Image: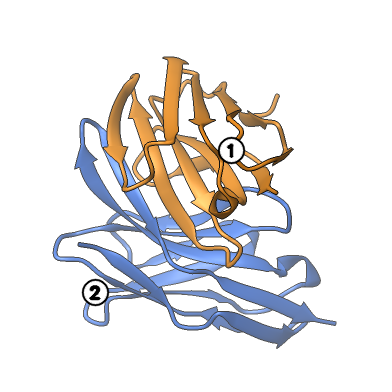
Amino acid sequence: AQSVTQLDSQVPVFEEAPVELRCNYSSSVSVYLFWYVQYPNQGLQLLLKYLSGSTLVKGINGFEAEFNKSQTSFHLRKPSVHISDTAEYFCAVSLYSGAGSYQLTFGKGTKLSVIP
Amino acid sequence: DTAVSQTPKYLVTQMGNDKSIKCEQNLGHDTMYWYKQDSKKFLKIMFSYNNKELIINETVPNRFSPKSPDKAHLNLHINSLELGDSAVYFCASSQTPGKLFFGSGTQLSVL
């Protein structure tokens, strides 16, 4: 079985400061890894994904994440946050479930609050 | 045009009622999903459909039933609503592994 752990439920950070949102996963097979963002009263949208290849992946809005197989981690980072980055962030793992479909399992989310 | 649209956005109803939430995607994706997000923001997959075939059915009560009239639609029917069904329900679609496009959600409140 696969699972995702987001170590911090809330992360407050001052505007223009760097931020790291932590994510660890467990799976017995190779997985695909994702970060999604949910702005207030909206659905989720994809920030970035790791499927294979380079372990450092870049996403939208200046975010990046690094896949670390030995530590089973996929932490999300941004060097300088903006007020508009205030949102809920979800780490997710995807496993092939057959018939051309992939099951996406989400972590419990980290609420990023950017302080002016 | 909205890629994944679901209606209604808000649904307030009494316990014991039957209700439906509709979802449509215009992306041509093969797979559609229903997720439930509780008050603590935890997301749980309920169903997915691939080419009109149910392929994932998590341990949800059989009061919940997905219905897909065609590839672009996946509706959610809920019978005999209970207080614990109150949540935000998200429809999503995908074509590539893990890359989901979500609707804006339906906030269901059962009184």
A96 to the left or right of A35 = left
Name the residue type under label 2.
Answer: Lys
| Marks 1, 2 in one chain | no
**Crowdedness near tag 2: few (<14), some (14–19) or many (≥20) residues, C-alpha within 10 Å:** few
Q: In which quadrant of the rendered view does residue A74 lie?
A: bottom left
The type of colouring in the image is: by chain
User: Circle 2 marks a residue in which chain?
Assistant: A
Q: Is residue A42 above or below residue A34?
A: above
Q: Which chain is orange?
A: B
Which residue position holds label 2? A69
Q: Nearer the viewer, residue A44 or A73?
A: A44
> Could you tell me which residue is drawn at 45 percent across and 70 percent down?
A65
Provide the secondary structure element on which disc 2 rests. loop
Residue designated by label 1: B16
Q: Residue at the location (57% across, 66% down)? A: A89
Q: How many marks?
A: 2
What residue appears at the point 56 percent right and 59 percent down from the top-left corner?
Answer: B38
* Residue type of the residue flagged with mark 1: Gly
Above or below, B61 relative to A92 = above
Residue at position x 51%, y 38% from top?
B92
Q: Please give left or right for residue A52 compared with residue B12 in the image.
A: left
Q: Is residue B9 visible?
A: yes
Colour chain A is painted in: blue
Q: Is residue A68 above or below residue B96?
A: below
User: In this image, A58 relative to A102: left or right?
Assistant: right
Q: Is residue A17 visible?
A: no
Decide: is A113 above or below A33.
Answer: below
What label does residue A77 carry, if any? none
Residue lying farthest right?
A116
